[in-house]
Each structure stands twice: as C-alpha cells, then as structure tokens.
Image: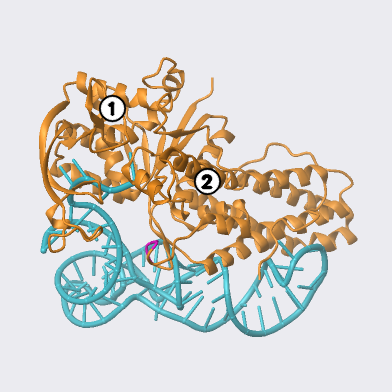
Chain colours: A orange, B cyan
Amino acid sequence: MSKTFYITTPIFYPNANLHMGHAYSTTLADIIARYRRLLNDDVYLLTGADENTEKVVRAASAANIEPQGYLDGIVQNFKTLFQKLHISYDQFIRTSDEKVHWPGAQAMWQRLVDAGDIEKRSYQGLYCVGHEAFITEKELMNGICPEHGEAPQQISEENYFFRLSKYTHLVRGKIQRGELEIIPETRRNEILALLERGLEDVSFSRPSHKVSVGIPVPGDASQKIYVWCDALVNYISALGFGRVDDTLFKQFWPADVHIIGKDILRFHAAIWPAMLLSAKLPLPKRLLVHGFITSGGKKMSKTLGNVIDPSVLISEYGGEAVRFFLARHVSPFEDSDFTPTSFKDAYNADLANGIGNLASRILKMAEDHLEEPITIEENLIPEAYTHAFDTLNIQRAAEIISETVARLDRRIQETQPFKLVKTDSEKGKAVITELVVDLYTVGRMLNPFMPETSKKIKELIKGNRMPSEPLFPRKA
RNA sequence: GCCGGUGUAGUUCAAUGGUAGAACGAGGGACUCAUAAGCCCUAAACAGUGGUCCGAUUCCACUCACCGGCACCA
C-alpha cells in the first residue's frame, strides 16, 4: 500500500481572472504533486474557488449577469488556465456547491458547537460597506475608509464567536514542536510572535439579512457562516468530511502540504489549526508560505496596470515554459520580481539554449551514429534533487536541472564525440550512449516541471531520433 | 511607533574573521554535434560611519535605504 500525499492550493476569489501569483501557487502545488507521483505516492491535489462572498455578487451585478452565471464563467476561465498550465488537480472545489462543500462546513460548525467553542455575542464596530467587513479606526483616513472613500457606520450586531483565544497556546505548541511545520523560518517566527501575544476570539457568522450568499448556520437560519468556517473548511469538505461518503477524508487527511501565499498565513497558521483542534481533527503537516510576484518591482495592481496575465505568456511561450520559469526563477519563500524581458531572457537561456539545444545536439549524434535505440536502465536521480523537493525548495530542484544541462554541454565539448566517432567508432558511440543516458535523466527530472517536454525527450530517445523541430525555438 | 528581516558585480543570488563565487546580461577567442546554440577567456560588487580584533564584507553600535509582521485584509 503506497503512501498517501495530500496537497492543496488556496481557493481563489472569482471576482477577477487569475494573475501570475495565483498561477504560481497552483503550479507549485502541481509540481510537488507530480514529483510525489513519481515516487509512487497516492497523491491528491485539490484546488478551487471561494465563492460565497459579497464581492462576487457585486462584480456580477456590475457585469450585469446573474451571480451563478458569473461564477460559472469565471470558474471556467480558471479551469481553462489550469489546463493550459497542465495542472493535474484531482478536484476543483467550489464553495457554492451545496452538495459537496456545505455539509462539511456545517459539520465543522457543529463540532465547534459541541466543543463549546461557539458563543453568541454582540459585536460592536465600524462597518465599511465596501469592505463588507468591520474595519478598525487605524485603517481610517480622516474618518473615511481610504479604499472605498466612504465613512464606516457604527453598528452593533449579533454574531456567533469562535473561542480562538482558548487555542492560542495549543497552536503555538504545535508549531514550536514542528507538528505543524511552517516554511520558511521567517514566516514561522512571524506567526509565533503573533501567538505569543495571544489571539482574540473571532466572529464566525454574519446576520443573514446582511449577506446574500453563504452557508446557513446549523439551527439558526438568521445567521450565515462567515468566511473562516466556510473557506478554510474546503480542505476537508472536498474529501467528504460531513458527507455520507467520507472515504477520501479518511484516506487523505491530514494534508501533507497546504500551499499558501503570505497574505493568508494567519488564517492558516492560527485560525485553521485552532478550528481543527476544537473539532478534534488532526492538523495539516506543513504550510508552504510563498511570497508575491512583483511586476517591475511593484506590487501588481489594476490601477498601476501592471497585472501579469499568465495566459498572455502562455500563448506566446507555452504553458510548460511558464511553469519552468515559475519554478526556476520565482522563490518559493520570498517575493520575486517579474518583467517580460526577464522572462524572455530566462526562456532563451534555460530552455532554447539550454534544455532544447542539448536535446538536439545529443539526439542528432545518436540518430546519426547509433544503429538502434539504447535501452535505459532506471538511472540515478541526483540526491540533491530529491533533497530539494523534500525541503520544498522547488527552485533549487529546477536549478539542479539547469546545472545538469550545463555539465552535459561541457562534457560534449571536452569529449568531442562528433569527432571521436570518426576516428574511433566504438569509443565515440560509447560516449554518445552515455550522453543519451544522461539526457534521459534530465528528462526524468523534468517530469514534475514540464511533463510534456519530459515525455517528448523520453520518446525521442526511445525512437533514437532528433527532434524534427526545436523543442523551444529561440525568441528574438 | 513596536518587533523582525534585508542591503555583495548591470540584474538575480552565494560564501567567508585573513583582501569575495555563480548564473543571466556585456566584450573577446577557438571550434562545429546543435536552435549563430554550446565551450573557453575578460571586465564588473562587499550601502555609509564608528568600534572590537594582528586583521572584518563577515562580529558589535549607529545612520541611511528597502521589505515583512503588528489580529478578521484569503
């Protein structure tokens, strides 16, 4: 029986199409998933959309469409993008799905109630309609919400609260002992500092009359479940938690890795573990907290007009090239910058001049001088490569591929098999054979990053022929 | 304001208490199996000031700059 491996992406807001940052989260998760499949793990990759939000309703009415139709359209865009990026997800969960998701959210709620951690309280605060949330005085500029340009209303409402404060200490212990591992270290320290100060209880519901979408609180239709006990629960509702058939849940939970962006660290490292503890469920094993992709040194924003649309790049360079760039040049731990020029340079260096050219030169020699395809034994993958994956340093793993390519280029230069084969046919062929074997290794290492290219290289080797056209044509 | 981090070649990063390595980009060279690709060579950097030390880019302090966190912003 093989080991299970459950990995998730965040669920995305369908109020706009996905940008490069979303593509990164998802690609990262997919690369890890594919790597684990190579190890013969029983892998489950989850992604999805976070749909129960007022913002979606507003975006839909702005676009003059029914909310559901609007959602379906956007989700279709997500899926189209994921397809182009070769995201091999096992499930795409939608939190508006009353059959798949809602039972899980309500079951979680019930567990929190049973644990005595849900309480009805009156909440007082400044409510900003634009935020669809309470905001703090500190956020205001001259008494006005700077983001929405309107003054918040002082209101008081009945909410159910989750007793998050009760779990501060427990969650902290879990993180300190590494039972919930947070990568990288800086994010771990950040959240520990936060937990050190203690967490206040959080509001876990909204009055139904105020929000038009959302999951009803079990036993109290006047309230709807607020985002925490809705969105976060997707990770288990997707597996059948709260439904009759919870086979997947039993099989795959707890998650091996949640991939998240740094903006949602607190929810995943504080609220989510606290909920799971309250519900007496196991905690995820690891959180990989990546940074943002900046665009020309600045945060992507609509107003700056510097939002990077992955589909534009894909149509010019192909999904595989975008995947490789994300893996090779975006840090899984810190912010990284993107410019169209840096992308093109990286494409030419890594793919056209690197992997693509190497495949052509080796396979040309093989085609010309080897009588028949060589049979490849399962060859060794560098230990550094597996170590990089084990520590979730995907960038390093991709770098190792580039280093391997460079080493092979150098060896061709040193051994000159194209000459050797003329003077000493046997020796020349032996060198070429070795090169083909090593190219096969490159193909194998490439599998998680560029599944199609990996397959192509292996097929060419099996057919003992060079590519009929360049794998990655050089871009001017 | 408080806490934490960073500041190294044009760019992205690395290392080290004894005068800094790589990749991409730039310039030059010899070759030709290859996508005028690859290989070899060259130029190019330790934010600033002070301190500890025989000696600091590396340790400490301060200054400047940038980044992150500081609770309901997925």
Position above or below: A96 against A243:
below
Amino acid on which disc 1 is placed:
Pro
The C terminus of chain A is located in which quarter? bottom right
The N terminus of chain A is located in which quarter? top right
Residue A300 drawn in magenta? yes
Q: Which mark is residue A77?
A: 2
Identify the residue under disc 1.
A216
Q: Toward which corner of the image does residue A301 lie, by quadrant? A: bottom left
Label 1 crowd bin: few (<14), some (14–19), many (20+), radius 10 Å: many
Q: How many marks?
A: 2
Position above or below: A304 against A242:
below
Q: Which of disc 1 and disc 2 is earlier in sequence?
A: 2
Span shown in magenta: A298-302
Give the chain of mark 1.
Answer: A
Give the chain of mark 2.
Answer: A
The residue sitting at the front extreme is: A64
Position above or below: A266 against A38:
below
The residue sitting at the top extreme is: A244
